[in-house]
Image: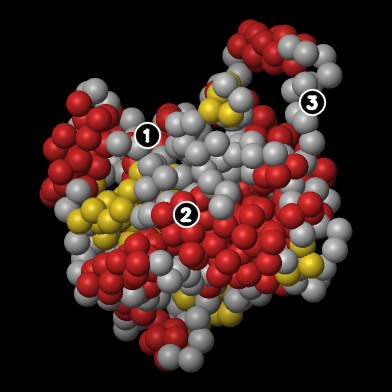
Amino acid sequence: MRPIWIVDDDRSIRWVLEKALARENIPCKAFGVAQDVLKELDHDSPQVLVSDIRMPGMNGIELLRAVKRKHPALPVIIMTAFSDLESAVSAFQGGAFEYLPKPFDVDKAVELIRRAVDESLREARADESPVDVPEILGQAPSMQEVFRAIGRLSQSNVTVLLTGESGCGKEVVARALHKHSQRAAAPFIALNMAAIPRDLLESELFGHERGAFTGAQAMRRGRFEQAEGGTLFLDEIGDMPAELQTRLLRVLSDGFYYRVGGHQPIKADVRVIAATHQNLEERVRQGLFREDLYHRLNVIRLRLPSLRERREDIPLLARHFLARSARELGVEPKQLSEEALQYIAQLPFPGNVRQLENLCHWLTVLAPAQVVKVEDLPLDARQGNWATPGETVGGGAAPAGAAGGIAVAAAAPLLAGGTDWVAQLTAEVERRLQAGVPDLMEALTRDFEAAVIRTALKHTHGRRIDAATRLGVGRNTITRKIQDLRLED
């Protein structure tokens, strides 16, 4: 972690914060004037910047603007007296993470700095995550069309709608559109509409002010604000609630938005890329999706082909995923025999590229020999239990999750007690309701997700990709959940 930079002309304030951070083993560096900070920024940068407003020479607001021009994602905490409320408003409009009123409680100041550090590290991971995503591989004519479209769109800020089946690589294409655009130096922020609880989605997207609702103890920047100057990727846009569709339409049309509980409009300089596997035209006809929002999003539509439409790419992708899985696990890469490669190439892959990736990781972990034969493939693949979308297997519906994961054995009952766990959950809900516990839905949801993910990680000995496969969720989803639920602490 890089040091925290403290800027204040009052030596006693610098001393107090330096000592408090040292006790918490948080590295820091202190400055007496803003000009010294700007000189230091030429060859170094902090994890978080904490600055006073009133200083000789350049003041804190001017420093904030100068820093944000060089490092737009850097969290800046502005220290101010209570009488400087107008300056605090200016600070937020300039992109400050939070303001710290003087005189302040030292413990609360350290807690605020820790939150800013968490935000900084999270955004750094978001910025670095494209490095972990492979290049878009493909020699099929349908993929060449995708590559050409990315090239044509590279100099444009136009809104793009990505369509295609689940697992065909919509987020990878969105990252490529960002990487090759003029916004590449700014953040790429992704948000899955289907992965966030409905009652938290508005705050997640637009942020909230302190006291906007029960539990909002501090101002929080939303994904729009985090993506300022860059790209916001809204996955599964078809699942966006109707009330949020109205707010998103306003942002796309006017270019301004408000935090939840806020009264100051915030200018949005963000390119929006949306994605869906659903038929949005049909959802418009059903009244589930606003027609005017659909037309705002559908400026440029880019359809991604399913893996069944580009079977010639399967050998190339399989070799790539086998090599990457081996690197992640620190083992020698497995190789597919010619017969196994031909067999895999004719599978339907309803889960598309994501399912092929899961298969390759399964082979890296569980295939008995270095050269994989047909008989080494997982049982459900050899028995033809993968149905293409809309089809059924053996006269019945395809099993849930079949499109994305690899079954290792027949599923056991959900819990040994049959539906006893439902009764236990019902009793716990009743107990908390009687006790008047606030925010019950959010608390129970977090407890449930934490228990499921923690148990899955224990079962897979901490291997996140294995845990994601067994739970039927994406790798990015489980990583984000682990961070949000603080399961790494």
Task: Choose mark 2 or mark 1, whichever is in front.
Answer: 2
Cβ–Cβ below 8 Å for labels 1 and 3? no
Residue 487 falls left or right of residue 60: right
Residue 62 image offset from top left, x and y in percent: 29, 75
SS class of the residue under badge 3?
A: loop
Q: Which amino acid is tagged 2? A: Leu
Give me the disc on residue 307: 2
Locate residue 372 relative to residue 317 in the image: left or right: right
Badge 2: few (under 14), some or many (20 or more) residues near its Cα, within 10 Å?
Answer: many
Query: What residue do we see at 42% from left, 45% from top?
Result: 165
Residue farthest to the right, as pictured = 368
Q: Write down the residue under mark 1.
A: 239
Q: First in sequence: mark 2 or mark 3?
A: 2
Q: How far apart are marks 2 and 3 (CA)?
A: 31 Å
Residue 112 in picture, x, y percent from top left:
55, 55
Pinpoint residue 410: horizontal percent, then vertical percent: 77, 31
The residue that appears at 46% across and 52% down in the rendered structure is 308
- Mark with earlier residue (1, 3): 1
